[in-house]
Structure formats: C-alpha cells, structure tokens
Image (cartoon, rainbow, N blue to C red):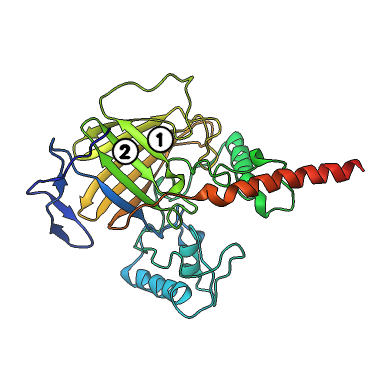
Amino acid sequence: MIAAFAPAVSAGQTSASGPAATKQTLPRTPDGRPDLQGVWLNNDATPLERPKALEGKQFLTEEEVAVLRKNAARLFAGDVDSDAAGGDNFFLAALANPVVYKNRNATGSGVGANREIDNRTSLIVDPPDGKIPLMTPAGRQRKLAADAAAFAGNSSSLPSGPEDLSNFIRCLTYGAPRIGGAAASYHNYYQIVQTPGYVMFLSEAMHDARIIPLDGRPHLPQTIRRWLGDSRGRWEGSTLVVDTTNYSPNSTLLGSAENLHVVERFTRTALDRIRYEMTVADPTTWATPWTAMVRLKRTDDRIYEDACHEGNQAVMEDILAGARAVEKAAVR
C-alpha cells in the first residue's frame, strides 16, 4: 500500500507566470521537496516542430498571438462548420486561417477548442531551429513502419492481424514520454503522486502508470526491456529528474525504439504550472539529442479509467475474420 504525501507550505518561494513575476507560495512535501502532486493537463497548442512559415522566429509578438487566438476561436469555437484539429494541426490551422477546417477522421470542432496558444513557435527548444535533428536511414525506416501501423485502418491495404497495427490502436500503450501528435489534444491528463521513496506518473491514456524509485538504485539489466522503459528519479534542487532507458523493441517514439534514452525534468513554476522538459537521445535514430518543453497546467478535473478495450476487442476479431475471408476467397 502506498500513501501519498500531504502537502506542506513553504514560504518565500517565488515563481514567474506571464510577463510579470508574481510571488507565490508553492507547496512542499513534509520532507521538504517540491510538491508536484495532483492532476495536470497538457493543453499546449504549440507545435512540436517550428512551421516553415515561422522559420527563424522563436517567439511570436503579443499581436501575433492575439491573431492566432482569434483565428482558432473562429475556426473551433465559433459558428464555422469545422472538424476537430488534433495535435499540431490546431496551431497550423490557426496559422493558415482557412475558411473552414476539415478532417475526414474527426468531427466536432469543440473538441480541443480550449487549447492554449502562447508566444512559442515550437515545443522543441534545442536545437535552436526548433526542428527534430536529421534522422538516420534506420530511424527513417522505423518511423515509416510506425506511421504505417498507426494509419493501417485508414489505408487501402488490409492488416492481416493486430500485429500490423500500432500499440495505440491495439490499446496497449501510447508510450512514454508522449510528445507531438495528439499528446496535447487527446487523453492529455496526468496524475502525479509522491511518497517518501517513489513518484508515480499516471497517464489518462491506457491508464499507463510509471512507478519511479528515488533511492539511487541502478537501472535494470539491459536484458530486461519494458514498454515504458526503466525509470530512475532523483532531485536536483527543486527539479525532479527522471532518467529512462531499457525500452522494448516494440516501443516507439518518432522512429526510436529500444535504444531510446530519455531524461525528463519536472519543475513546479507556479501553483498551477509545471515546466516539463524532456531530452531524448538515440544515435541510431537521430544525429544529435534534442529537447522539448511542455507547460503542464493544474486542473481540478479527475482522471477516469480509459475504456479503450471496451470497443476494441470486436475490432481485432473482425480484422482477423476479414483477413481469413480474403485468404479463403483467394484459394477458390
């Protein structure tokens, strides 16, 4: 049984939120660590990579931010008959400002209409150009295979079985960390629980739970591989640092798999904000490591059980039945 800390108050802590810094008293746990507990929402509309139209521009002006917010409100919260824009498409649609946004795979423009647009033009903060570094040939092949599995249900070729589909479609896992794509528009709630020797991160997506020891123990042997990797945590001042290795060959992050190495940094910057940075490295996938930053927002909402499997078993059975029917017809 794991009992979570009850928050204590630490006086004199300051934080900057917005253009002007405001003094805030940030909570701490009884052992003096920053209290990161609660439910947090990734609602960033900022795209993972800097769009071509904004090349060389790291930050937007206040006027440009206001225009994007106005465009997004018209497209996704107004009377326009738009469809939902997942992932980076929300920002890109606000940037292009079409008459209407259409997505054949989604309906209901209100989904994600409350995404937050700020002055950043990419989640990637390093390299400075806001782009994922050059991929290796092997990395490109893995990414193409992962993309094909993710969109197998929308392609003209029939999958032979569940193994031809992505981990997400099979309701196995979204993977960790979640970055890019639908990470900020779908299943984007996270709960953090702290205890004296552990921290737990629960994702709304697939109810993935990462229970991370903080006692300095070494990583598991390289022969033991996990969907979400093997994580070890430590404190560096007021920042929680989580180092993750030992990913499964079946894991996937933008083309990376078992050679992925992730270092995450969680810093509470305000009562309602956590600065979440992740540095990912895999020399078999990218020429250099790269770093992205997401702003997590505190919410009073609750996380409910992800019921992905409720409607998915029949889908998997139908895929198998359809493939066998095609094979049977070919024999005739």
Give the residue type that dot 2 points to. Answer: Met
Q: Name above or below for residue 71 compared with residue 252.
A: below
Number of residues whose C-alpha sits closer than 10 Å to that of mark 2, classed few (under 14), some (14–19) or many (20 or more): some
In the displayed structure image, the side of residue 152 where residue 331 appears, left or right: right
Give the residue at x 45% y 48%.
Answer: 205
- Quarter containing the C terminus: top right
Q: Hey, which residue is sitting farthest left in the picture?
A: 11
In the rendered structure, which amino acid carries the disc numbered 1?
Answer: Val
Q: Nearer the viewer, mark 2 or mark 1?
A: 2
Q: Which residue is mark 1?
A: 262
Q: Quadrant of the N terminus?
A: top left
Q: Which disc is residue 95 wearing?
A: none
**Quadrant position of residue 70:** bottom left
User: Mark 2 and 1 residues: CB-CB less than 8 Å, in contact?
Assistant: no
Residue positioned most to the right? 332
Instruction: Tell me the element at label 2.
Output: strand
Residue 287, given in percent of the width and then of the height, sits at 50, 36
Secondary structure beneath dot 1 equals strand
x and y, in percent, of residue 115 in the image? 39, 63
The first of marks 2 and 1 along the sequence is 2
Q: Residue at x 39, y 39 (%)?
A: 209
Residue at the disc numbered 2 = 200
Q: Quadrant of residue 154?
A: bottom right
Q: Give how far across and how far down residue 288 sits, in percent.
A: 46, 36
The residue under the point 12% across, 38% down is 30
Q: Is residue 162 above or below residue 68?
A: above
- Is 14 placed left or right of 278 in the picture? left
Given residues 10 and 237, the one toward you in this image is 10
Q: Point out residue 146 in the picture as x, y percentages from the top left corner.
A: 60, 42
Alpha-carbon span between mark 2 and mark 1: 17 Å
Q: Is residue 197 left or right of residue 187?
A: left
Q: What residue lies at 22% left-to-right and 62% top-to-bottom?
A: 19
